[in-house]
Image (spheres, coloured by chain):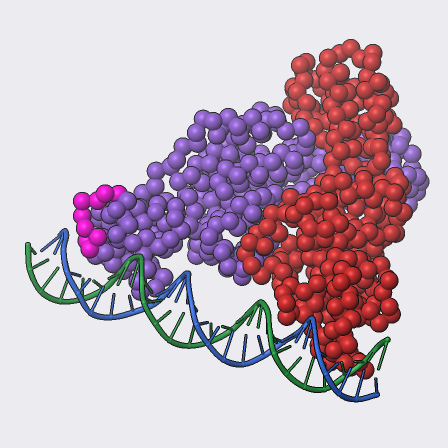
Chain colours: A purple, B red, C blue, D green
Amino acid sequence: MLTDRQSAILGMVVDEYVETAEPVSSRALVDRHRLEISSATIRNEMARLEREGYITHPYTSAGRIPSDLGYRFYVEALMSEAPVALDERRTVEHQLHQVAGGLDEWLSLTATILSSLVGNVAVVTRPRTSTARLRHAQLVELSRDTALLVSVMDDGRVRQRILQQRQPVTQDQLNARATRLNGLLAGADAANVRDRLVGLEDPDEVATARAVAESIEELRIAEETFLDGLNMALRQPEFSDVDRMLEAVTQLQAYRLRGLLESTVDDHVGSTRVIIGQENPDTGLQDWSVVVSRYGDTDAAGVVAVIGPTRMAYQRTIPRVRYIASLMGQILRDVGQ
Amino acid sequence: MLTDRQSAILGMVVDEYVETAEPVSSRALVDRHRLEISSATIRNEMARLEREGYITHPYTSAGRIPSDLGYRFYVEALMSEAPVALDERRTVEHQLHQVAGGLDEWLSLTATILSSLVGNVAVVTRPRTSTARLRHAQLVELSRDTALLVSVMDDGRVRQRILQQRQPVTQDQLNARATRLNGLLAGADAANVRDRLVGLEDPDEVATARAVAESIEELRIAEETFLDGLNMALRQPEFSDVDRMLEAVTQLQAYRLRGLLESTVDDHVGSTRVIIGQENPDTGLQDWSVVVSRYGDTDAAGVVAVIGPTRMAYQRTIPRVRYIASLMGQILRDVGQ
DNA sequence: ATTAGCACTCTCGCCGTGAGAGTGCTAAAT
DNA sequence: ATTTAGCACTCTCACGGCGAGAGTGCTAAT
């Protein structure tokens, strides 16, 4: 267990290192915080903190940097959150409410805003119903033998699909078919949609119904992510050499928050989870931290996250992720049902 | 005017430099191509080529590298295109036909494929009708006082929007309203949609009609781009220092092919345009080349492009961009009307 | 328990230097 | 008149050495 003084020193090391990106020396702490104790005492304490695994130093005579464990302790016990200032809120809310356009534009904008708020990469996933249910399907004639299927889900998401027809059809026939299918499939989710398809005969109608079913399933799975702020994150000094930067670009481009939604499914809304360095099962992201929060409610839930080097301003990042998540939930609720 | 021998030398310099990314020496040319003439002769010719502006050298005693003009001449007069091999085609077509999902997934996949084909950044814009026309609008009840508007365009694009209702409505009422609006607005484009709105009375109905109008206009403007292959491009040796790489990431993330569609509108389909270095009006992209091609037809046209350093394998890139563009046009035609 | 003092370690930026690569020029050869 | 051999000259780049500086760990004194 850490003494109060050790905790205090760890806290200062983290704060200092987060700010400067330079290993923190005993001397620097004394100077910056006008401590009453000498640098030698700090050195002794630091040696103990290092023995316990909270900090390391890169080589014999450099200052100390926090380890993953050190950050973890900091986040858990030491950190005081930096509240989101009123004018920050105002700008964000102004921008977020203003957007004219679809869900996707809105999500993409949210990622942009969050990334500029925290100076790191921000990722937002589409909100996703626990089980997507069909509200309505519609068929539109594109040409004599092709039709466009538009499947609308409970939560307002839409999936479109182009269908080749064996038999030429008119818009009237398509309307009739849509009405039949809606009667059959309305409210169906991915689990039971296949069961409802029995009894259909016309092959084109069967094909259409299948396409509806596939649309529902795709939407259940589709976990499109919106990512922004790569250039922000890359400005951090940890990427001051080319290989690391290239590595970072590759990792982040590919990173799809896969599984994060699942893993946070038990979290209650409002809680924000922090994954620090090695704690991330994804190798290759072990120098990174992820701050992730669910947004929405049980009907439609998504994930919003910030990704950055472990040396991250957790104090600022965590409350801002939480704030954006709750704001998104709120807007979705106001606008949705 | 260049003599045959000068052309030949320029061609060799470009080929060599594109391959190795190292300035090309007179000696290297003689060795690699087993030339009958001596390196001194090559040096004389190179000096002339440099005086004419086709090549430069970075410092007194380095080899030569092509200038923008040199690349231009190469592309125009010297280059023989590297045909897209049969198995390349097969893999591409296999991947492209296989995708199940919407237009956006398809476009995004296309960008991925093209980028891996040429090892540089690939960008694809959504196909865009010269003037989007409304085919069909649909209203879906989300709750007692909110409705979802889905506007479907001629070319299959869809725009969705959530509408607050002053008066509570049922799905039946919404259907009736949709039918009225479709009668009124079907075939309308951004230019004349406003004129058709006269005579509506119910404020909710007016609001809905306005929303349809806005959807049409948004779609006319919406020029979403799909970009992939950043990490590929960044592997090029021109980005071997951090500042350049960061600069590149920032530029490319922001690059939206703005205006490229307009500027290529006179090009006939099948032609591929190459913009080399300084020729690009966009400052900050002046070390880059863009190979761009229109795809689709007059009804629905988009742009597909590859962006990379001026030292680009034009021989391979140009035919591959053209191939992908024509393939996209073909698939759109098969599937569309 | 704290602290002053000091030896020790390691990094990092700087400088000089020499090898190597390549050119341009001159003068000879074709 | 063109080509070529030869050579002086230029510039880069990798390498090693070196010294300053920063910081620690330890010891001995407080």
Residue pictured at 88% horizontal, 48% vertical: B269
Q: Would you say residue A336 is visible in this rendering? A: yes
Residue B225, horizontal then vertical, whole percent? 71, 44
Residue shown at 62%/34% (left/top)? Answer: A106
Inspect this view and state whether residue B127 appears. Answer: no
Q: Is A30 left or right of A300, judged from the image as shown?
A: left
Does the magenta portion include B100? no
- Left or right, residue A304 beside residue A79: right
Residue A35 falls inside the magenta stretch: yes
Q: Is residue B33 above or below residue B147?
A: below
Of B30 and B167, which appears nearest the observer? B30
Query: Residue A89 or A176: which is nearer the viewer?
Result: A89
Along the line of sight, the residue nearer the viewer: A112 or B211: A112
Q: Magenta residues, as a range?
A: A33-41
Q: Residue at x 58, y 29 (%)?
A: A95
* Image-quadrant location for residue B22: bottom right
